[in-house]
């Protein structure tokens, strides 16, 4: 919101002795140009006055509600025509980058389809091992840039770490389900991850936009894979218990990092409930959708923002936005802060 400010210095400062009526005062945007025509003392007085007015306006601005900054949205279908995650045309360079990414993704999918046609848990183990590698690569390059003093993006590092933390627990779940029981599966997953890491580092240094789009393609495939698996084996999964790794992660009291990677949602707006193995895969699928949204946001330079980075975001809400109402601790904390 732009607030117009009216200079309060007397117009006589800008008029010459003996001259007629002073001309109309210029708009605030021309204060600096106008001040250059004055003497040194008047110039500094006006400059300090402008800075004081600007500071006062910043203090009086109302905090933006956290819902407006990070609106809670339902997970959109990955294959819809109006999917907000579908990249738009931005020039031949972007089209070339995306074409290369789609070719690479389709090649990997072809290999996975051929090797793991009827071995779902092994396929998921390989997929989760690969899916968390880009976040390691992003963090490595960001730390390198920060060390050299080129680029400092704390929100990016924090969000990417939260994404890798989420993918790590997906991997632990697949290991508990027996996805890594064969040495050939472990070898293939780690072999691909090793080269994928260095490829992503080089891609990220060449074009962060391209690297983020490639990761979006991987996450989109992961969402599609889990969604098809749920539709084919839903009834069977509902009769199986949830792995311990899933219960420890999704039902943990400390879900700060769980909220952190979901940059399109209000913190605490999603709290999974797990009664069986079906619920576990539903949550993993929805996690992949949130990763896809975050990767899409990253493709616009400087667009990524941590869900927890809004100043006093909790103090702007009187209740915790969650359909399950299982964030009583945060609600109590907010109420105490409001009564002080």
Image (tube, helix red, strand yellow):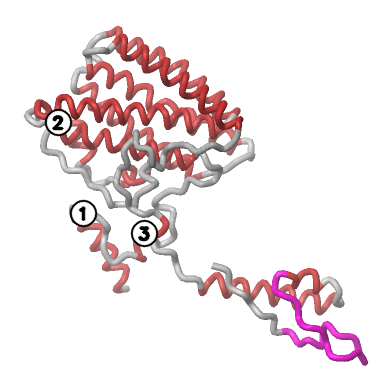
Q: Earlier in the sequence, mark 2 or mark 1?
A: 2
Q: Which mark is residue 323?
A: 1
The answer to whether mark 2 and mark 1 are in CB contact below 8 A is no
Residue 174: give x, y in percent of width and height. Answer: 24, 23
Dominant secondary structure of the residues highlighted in magenta in the image: loop
Secondary structure beneath disc 2? helix
* Image-based side of 214 in relation to 228, left or right: right
338 w.r.t. 71: above or below: below
SS type, badge 1 = loop
Let me know if residue 206 is in the magenta part.
no
- Is residue 307 placed above or below 284 in the rendered structure? below
Give the residue displayed 53% in from the left and 25% down from the top. 201
> Badge 3 local density, few (<14 within 10 Å), some, or many (20+)?
some
Q: What crowding class fits label 2: few (fewer than 14 Cα within 10 Å), some (14-19), or many (20 or more)?
A: some
Which residue is disc 3 drawn over? 67
Judged left or right of residue 209, residue 131 is left
Image quarter hosting the N terminus: bottom right
**Residue shown at 6% from the left, 29% from the top:** 239
User: Residue 70: where, in percent of width, then height?
Assistant: 39, 54
Residue 28 image-quadrant placement: bottom right
Query: On the image, which quarter does residue 147 sit in?
Result: top right
Name the residue nearer the viewer: 279 or 320: 279
Residue 12 within the magenta-colored segment of the rendering: yes
- Element under disc 3: helix
Residue receiving disc 2: 277
Q: Which residues are magenta?
A: 9-29
**Residue lying at the far left of the rendered structure:** 239
């Amino acid at each position: 919101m732009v607030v117009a400010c009216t200079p309060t210095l007397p117009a006589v400062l800008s008029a010459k002795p003996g001259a007629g009526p002073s001309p109309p005062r210029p708009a605030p945007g021309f204060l600096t140009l106008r001040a250059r025509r004055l003497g040194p003392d008047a110039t500094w007085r006006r400059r300090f006055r402008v800075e004081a007015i600007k500071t006062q306006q910043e203090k009086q601005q109302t905090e933006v509600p956290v819902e407006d900054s990070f609106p809670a949205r339902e997970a959109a279908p990955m294959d819809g025509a109006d999917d907000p995650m579908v990249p738009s045309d931005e020039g031949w360079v972007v089209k070339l980058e995306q074409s290369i990414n789609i070719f690479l993704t389709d090649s990997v999918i072809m290999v996975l389809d051929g090797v793991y046609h009827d071995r779902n848990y092994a396929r998921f183990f390989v997929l989760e091992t690969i899916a968390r590698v880009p976040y390691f690569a992003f963090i490595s390059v960001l730390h390198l840039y920060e060390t050299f003093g080129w680029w400092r993006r704390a929100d990016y590092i924090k969000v990417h770490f939260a994404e890798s933390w989420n993918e790590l627990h997906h991997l632990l779940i697949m290991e508990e389900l027996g996805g890594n029981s064969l040495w050939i599966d472990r070898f293939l997953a780690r072999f691909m991850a090793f080269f994928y890491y260095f490829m992503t580092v080089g891609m990220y240094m060449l074009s962060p936009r391209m690297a983020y789009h490639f990761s979006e393609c991987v996450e989109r495939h992961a969402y599609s894979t889990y969604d098809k698996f749920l539709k084919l084996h839903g009834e069977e999964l509902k009769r199986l218990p949830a792995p311990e790794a899933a219960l420890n992660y999704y039902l943990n009291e400390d879900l700060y990092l769980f909220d952190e990677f979901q940059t399109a949602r209000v913190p605490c707006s999603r709290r999974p409930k797990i009664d069986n193995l079906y619920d576990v895969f539903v949550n993993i699928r929805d996690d992949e959708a949130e990763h896809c949204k975050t990767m899409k946001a990253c493709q616009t330079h400087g667009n990524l923002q941590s869900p927890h980075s809004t100043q006093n975001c909790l103090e702007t809400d009187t209740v915790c936005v969650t359909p399950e109402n299982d964030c009583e601790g945060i609600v109590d904390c907010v109420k105490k802060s409001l009564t002080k």
